[in-house]
Amino acid sequence: MAFDASTDASDEVLMVLYANGDRHAALALTQRVTPRVLAYATRMLNGDRAEAEDVAQETMLRLWRMAPEWRQGETKVTTWAYRVATNLCIDRQRSRKRKAQTALDDAPDLAASGRSADGTLIQADRMAALGQALGQLPDRQRQAVVLRHIEGLTNPEIAEVMQIGVEAVESLTARGKRALAALLSGQKDALGYKDERDDD
Amino acid sequence: MTTDDLDGLLADAARTRPDPSPAFMDRVLADALALQPQPVALQPASPRRAGAPRPGLLSRLAGLFGGGPVLAGVCSAALVGGALGYLSPGTYDYVTGGLADTTGDPVDLFPTSDFLSSEG
């Protein structure tokens, strides 16, 4: 029986099949889980793709090693993977902070980037602006906002990933969004909102 | 920036997930296959041939006594013993033709052996 990322089998079933030596399950899990972990790690690490790939590969390695002992019904595979990736990202962020220069210092300043004042940023630039603003949030707020509003997890799932209560998740998400709005408010024109409304 | 603006920007971000490169996906899949446990080969439940019938209870009981003929002998002896115990002694005359003394008097099997117990 061949699987791919679109198979109806749940991640948990695929884990059991993988542990039983099913190579198609290995392929399906790789295609299904890896892109999500990589995207999350990329946002958590301020867009550092190389480092995000290291985190995603290490997360998947731990998943493969965990498979023979996987117990169904205790946690979702993606929730487990997000939790591992979160811890790996935190370790790397701490390592960065110990260095003289942080990634934030290296990031280009949008306000001083010399883009034309009347031009609307293309989608990639909007995402870059969002990524930079996310990078300025405290770690826990960034995790909560990314998991909730970009990765689409529910609050209980985020609570399991971050190993905190659901109320704490709600608080972190709300504070994170307020901080994000404040950080991006100075770039409203640059983000293209004014121009889009003028066009309507 | 309004809440709607921010929600729209976050929704755009959710839709524009960066795709992993094929080379990276190949590395992850190679790890998966390298660490995957080998499939367990199925073993037959027992070395007995699949078509061989399982012996019945009577066959296994006969085996305990050393085989069918031995078991038949044991059963016959048990039946005869039970019958002899059940019938009254007088009934045996039909079988023995009066040869057996069933009156209850003692039978002197060795009448000429009194000299062995005499003194002097």
Image (spheres, coloured by chain):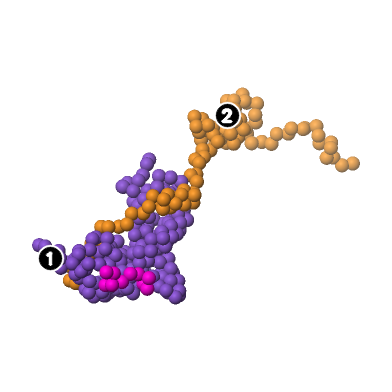
Chain colours: A purple, B orange
Q: Dot 1 falls on which chain?
A: A
Q: Depth-wise, is mark 2 or mark 1 nearer the camera?
A: 1
Residue in front for this viewpoint, B18 or B87: B18
- The amino acid beneath tag 1 is Arg
Residue in front for this viewpoint, A73 or B93: A73
Q: Position of residue A113 (x, y in %)?
A: 29, 69
Number of numbered markers:
2
Q: Regarding mark 2 in the picture, which secondary structure is present there? A: helix
Residue pictured at 41% horizontal, 60% vertical: A50
Q: Residue furthest left?
A: A200
Residue pictured at 34% horizontal, 57% vertical: A36
In the rendered image, which quarter contains the N terminus of chain B?
Answer: bottom left
Residue in front for this viewpoint, B1 or B118: B1
Q: Position of residue B41 (x, y in %)?
A: 50, 41
Q: Position of residue A138 (x, y in %)?
A: 33, 74
Residue pictured at 51% horizontal, 40% vertical: B43
Residue in front for this viewpoint, B64 or A174: A174
Residue range corresponding to the magenta coloring = A104-114
Residue B17 visible in this rendered orientation of the protein: yes
Q: Residues within 10 Å of mark 2 (few under 14, many from 20)?
A: some
What whole-number distance in Å separates the C-alpha atoms at marks 2 and 1? Answer: 102 Å
Number of the label disc, if any, that sits on residue B68: 2
Q: Position of residue A62 (x, y in %)?
A: 45, 58
- Residue that numbered label 1 is attached to: A197
Q: Regarding mark 1 in the picture, which secondary structure is present there? A: helix
Discs 2 and 1 share one subunit: no
Residue A44 visible in this rendered orientation of the protein: no
Q: Dot 2 falls on which chain?
A: B
